[in-house]
Image (tube, helix red, strand yellow):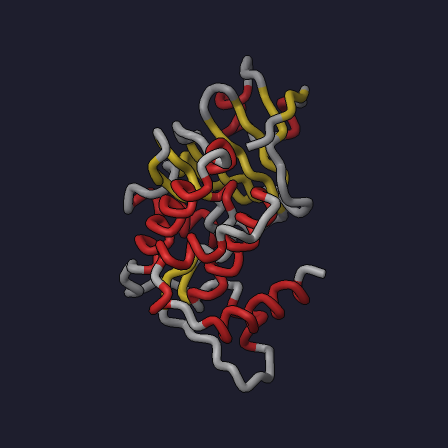
Amino acid sequence: MKKTKIDIRLNDFPKELHKLLEGATVYDSSSHPQNKVYYSDFGYYIKVSDTGTLLKEAQLSELFAAKGMGPKVETYLSADKDYLVTEALKGEDPLHYLDNPKKLCKELADAMKLLHGWQLDSVPVSSCMDFYDELDREVSFEQDTFIHGDFCLPNVMLMDGKFSAFIDVGLSGVGDRHIDIYWVLWSLWYNLKTDKYTDTFLDYYGRDKVDMEQLKVVAEVETHAHE
């Protein structure tokens, strides 16, 4: 995950967070324009966004943490802005393992199968499905799987080359598995600069679980949504 050392003004943050920042070296680790993410070398990530926008992510982060597959949530504050503080995880994202694409595909497929196998009791619908529900298409989009919603390489953590946790889970919830499959294949293509490992991932994940026509439709929808 990219980190750029920055100077901050302590009073720009709620006083409840000062103990995590005062005397720390702080880095900007933002990857999306709508959020700011700061890393304190005391061992915390602080995500900042508009008031009320991080509540669902905080709740979902608690769920992942309870299952031992996400960072511990230190605190969630909603004031002038929303502040979600999570402990920094040990390990690295898959971008550090691009020199072994087949092994990488296996770890990502195993992580996805584990996530997609979660029980759905009392789990909210992924906000990804809001856009799909508005579409008037012959193809139906299922809501039968727990998905990440943004299953790109930087949102998966590995420890010693093995899957350990998910991060940035604000889009997770019940949805169509092909959304995750599309995004991991896109992320592999984007980072490896080739699509030759698409079949490798699908073989590890299980082709019997993938409807290729459905995947094509999801690709069209996601490409259009992010233009």
**Nearest to the observer: residue 210 or residue 25:** 210
Pick the residue in front: 176 or 207. 207
**Residue at the spot 40% in from the left edge and 65% down from the top edge:** 174
Q: Nearer the viewer, residue 12 or 130?
A: 130
**Residue at the spot x=58%, y=70% of the render?**
131
* Image location (x, y in percent) of residue 203: 37, 58
Residue 72 in sight in this render: yes
Which residue is more in the foreground, 65 or 154? 154
Q: Residue at x 53, y 52 (%)?
A: 196
Q: Which residue is outermost to the front? A: 196
In the rendered image, the residue lying farthest to the bottom is 138
Q: Residue 37: image x %, image y %?
A: 59, 36
Is 75 above or below relative to 125?
above
Asked whether residue 52 is in view, the answer is: no
* Residue 111 placement, left or right of 171: left
For this view, does 54 lie left or right of residue 209? right
The residue lying at 29 percent from left, 41 percent from top is 68
Q: How many marks?
A: 0
Give coordinates of residue 215: x percent, y percent: 51, 69
Q: Position of residue 20 (x, y in %)?
A: 49, 23
Q: Residue 26 occupies which quadrant of the picture?
A: top right
In the rendered image, the quadrant that contains the N terminus is top right
* Image quadrant occupied by the C terminus: bottom right
Q: Is residue 203 left or right of residue 182?
A: left
Q: Say if 199 sits above or below 176 in the image.
A: above
**Image position of 183 with respect to 30: above or below:** below
Residue situated furthest right in the rendering = 227
* 203 to 153, vertically: above or below: below
